[in-house]
Every structure is written in C-alpha cells, then in structure tokens.
C-alpha cells in the first residue's frame, strides 16, 4: 500500500498497514460485526414500518379491513351478534340502522307538522311538508323491515329527540323557523353518514333497500332545510334565492 506523505509517497510493507488504515483497528471479525449491525438496523426499520401504521390507525382490523375514520358515524351494538336470515346476514349495525330510521320518524314527523302549521315562510312550511311525507314512507318501510327481520322497534323518541321537539314547539315566529331548521338539519347531517355506512357495508338485501331509499329521502330533507336559509348552513336554492322545489314524484 502507498500513502502520500508530505514530501512524497511512502510505501508500507505487505501485511504491515497502520491501524488507521484498517477498519476498527484491524481487530479480527470487525468486518463481520459491522455487517451484522447493518442487518439488525435494517430489520429494526422494517419492524417500525409495520408497527407505526397500526399505532396511528387503530381502527384497521386484521384481514385488511378498512380503518374507521375519525368522526365516523356512531351506532349502537345490541350485543346480539350476526344472524343468518333468508335475505343475508344481519349484523348489529343493520339492526341499529332499522331502529334509527324508526326513531327519526318518531320525532321528525311531529316536527314537520309543526313547521307546516307555524312556519312563517313558505320555504319552512315546504320543508315541513317534505319531512312529514318522507318520514311517513321511511317509517312504513322500517316497520316492514323490522317485521321481516325480527328486529324490535322503539315506540317513542329518545329523551334527546323529545328535548329537540320540545324546543321547537316552544319557539315562536322567526325563532321557530330557526330552531326547527337548525335542529332538524343537524340531525339529518348525522344520520346521513350512518345511511352511507350501512349502504356500503350491509350484506342484507332488506336493509340495503331501506338504506338506498333513506339515502334519497334524507338528502332531499337536507336540501329543503338548507333552502329555508335558517339552518345555519348556506342554502343551495335556485338563482335569486328562491328555494329549490321538489316534485311530488320525488317523495313517493
């Protein structure tokens, strides 16, 4: 080996290289030790790559199931597990959806009737008409689905829903319009996410049909509530601010 010195090139006899020219001072096995550490580091990096996604996204289940996103729709597990039916498997999510469709009608139909009677604008009264018509249909469909699938249904609103209905009933004038539109629009925004979740995941034909129709009805209700200009959400009315009108055929 030749090493350039200050005044030329110095030659070292074979087998007598200086310690600084040999990795790790020339200790036996130093090269193998370095290789081992590189392998360990690579394995550690691979392990971190596998663990970090699980830690960041705990909703991801084994078997490649989709993660549950933050803010995903909330549903109640009745603890009855999955049941086989002639129409496909019936899950806790399916049963809860059928119950929630029924619950929605138990308070939104009365709210819609109040809007028809006491709304101070045509758009509020129109929203009330759509609520009554839409939830009359969905209530009938949910009752039929529950009968076919043997799902117990509630016969009265929840305490929270009754509280909303009481607030609407106590309001007067323009305050009524605002209270009605804000509360009912907010409730529809929550259930809309649940409808989409069920429509995407259910394997039961009866529940799927209910979710498909509910999706159309709930979206219609969201639109007419926003068209009132009182829901707290910018409305999507026709040019000039006139509320978008929906045909009777849409409500069938």
Image (tube, rainbow, N blue to C red):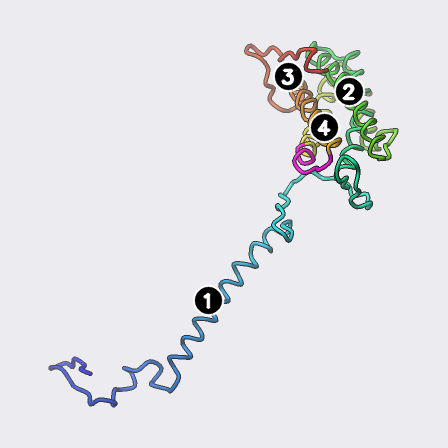
Residue numbers of the magenta segment: 196-204
Looking at the rendered structure, the secondary structure element under dot 1 is helix
User: Front-most of 180 and 3?
Assistant: 3
- Mark 4 / mark 3, whichever is N-terminal: 4
- Which residue is the site of mark 4? 209
Classify residue 147 by image quadrant.
Answer: top right
Q: CA distance from mark 4 to mark 3?
A: 28 Å
C-beta proximity under 8 Å, tags 3 and 1: no
- Residue at 61% across / 19% down in the picture? 235
Q: Main secondary structure of the magenta part?
A: helix
C-beta proximity under 8 Å, tags 4 and 2: no
- Which residue is the site of mark 1? 42
- Which residue is the site of mark 2? 137
Classify residue 242 by image quadrant.
Answer: top right
- Mark 4 / mark 2, whichever is N-terminal: 2
C-beta proximity under 8 Å, tags 1 and 4: no
Q: Nearer the viewer, mark 3 or mark 1?
A: 1
- Which residue is the site of mark 3? 227
Q: CA distance from mark 3 to mark 2?
A: 22 Å
Q: Residues within 10 Å of mark 1 (few under 14, many from 20)?
A: few
Q: Is residue 19 magenta?
A: no
Q: Residues within 10 Å of mark 3 (few under 14, many from 20)?
A: many
Q: CA distance from mark 1 to mark 4?
A: 51 Å
């Amino acid at each position: 080996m030749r090493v350039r010195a200050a005044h030329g090139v110095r030659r070292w006899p074979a087998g007598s290289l200086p310690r600084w020219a040999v990795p790790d001072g020339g200790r036996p096995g130093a090269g193998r030790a370095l290789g081992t550490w590189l392998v360990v580091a690579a394995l550690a990096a691979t392990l971190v790559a596998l663990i970090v996604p699980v830690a960041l996204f705990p909703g991801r289940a084994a078997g490649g199931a989709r993660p549950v996103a933050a803010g995903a729709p909330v549903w109640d597990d009745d603890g009855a597990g999955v049941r086989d039916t002639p129409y496909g498997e019936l899950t806790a999510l399916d049963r809860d959806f059928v119950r929630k469709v029924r619950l929605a009608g138990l308070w939104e139909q009365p709210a819609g009737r109040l809007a028809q009677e006491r709304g101070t604008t045509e758009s509020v009264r129109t929203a009330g008409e759509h609520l009554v018509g839409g939830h009359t249909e969905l209530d009938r469909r949910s009752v039929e689905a529950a009968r076919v699938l043997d799902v117990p249904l509630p016969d009265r609103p929840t305490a929270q829903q009754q509280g909303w209905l009481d607030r609407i009933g106590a309001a007067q004038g323009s305050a009524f319009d605002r209270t009605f539109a804000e509360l009912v629009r907010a409730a529809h925004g929550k259930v809309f996410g649940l409808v989409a979740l069920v429509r995407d995941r259910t394997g039961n034909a009866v529940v799927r049909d209910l979710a498909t129709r509910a999706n159309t009805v709930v979206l219609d209700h969201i639109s007419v509530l926003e068209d009132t200009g009182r829901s707290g959400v910018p409305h999507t009315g026709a040019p000039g601010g006139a509320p978008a009108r929906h045909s009777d055929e849409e409500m069938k």
